[in-house]
Image (spheres, rainbow, N blue to C red):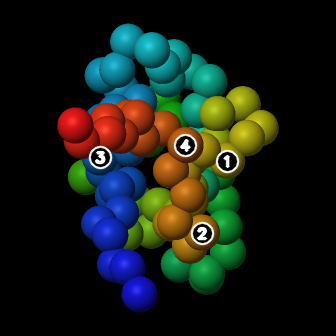
Amino acid sequence: MSHERFTTSREVYHRIRWDERFDPREFIIGYDTHDEVMAEMPFTAFVPDGEIPWHRVWYFKRRQQVVWDRRERLDLLAPPQHASP
């Protein structure tokens, strides 16, 4: 069974924030509230290292499409993998 490293929520946040291909206004962050209920907020409202810790961020959506999901190990924003020669 492969245990490849999975991109963290912090890494995804910074990819969206700094990669010129992405418009942060198109993204939503889904996070676990203390009651284990999922809530969402606009990406632009999220404060890194603020009230919501990284381990409670469970997914990112671009418009209505989930593009990163911790439980599903889905990362549609990952840079393309280059084949070795």
Q: Position of residue 34 (x, y in %)?
A: 53, 78
> For the point 56% across and 73% down, which residue is it?
71
- Please tell me the numbered disc located at residue 11: 3
Residue linked to disc 2: 72
Separation of marks 1 and 3 at Cα, in angstroms: 16 Å
Asked whether the residues under the numbered discs 1 and 4 touch, taking CB atoms below 8 Å apart as contact, a structural biologist would say no
Return the disc, 2 or 1, that comes first in the chain's sequence.
1
- Residue 38 appears in which quarter of the rendering? bottom right
**Marks 4 and 3, how far apart in space?**
13 Å
Instruction: Give the total number of marks visible in the rendering.
Output: 4
Label 1: element kind = strand
Left or right: 49 in relation to 28: left
Q: CA distance from mark 2 to mark 3?
A: 17 Å
Quarter of the picture holding the C terminus: top left
Residue 62 location, x and y as percent?
A: 64, 33
The amino acid at mark 2 is Glu
Q: Amino acid at mark 3?
A: Glu
* Residues packed near mark 1 inside 10 Å, few (<14), some (14 to 19) or many (20 plus): some
- Looking at the rendered structure, the kind of residue marked 1 is Val
User: Disc 4 to disc 2, how far (Cα)?
Assistant: 11 Å
Nearest to the observer: residue 60 or residue 5 = 5
Disc 4: which residue: 76
Q: Earlier in the sequence, mark 4 or mark 3?
A: 3
Q: Earlier in the sequence, mark 2 or mark 3?
A: 3
Describe residue 2's horizontal placement relative to residue 61 as left or right. Answer: left
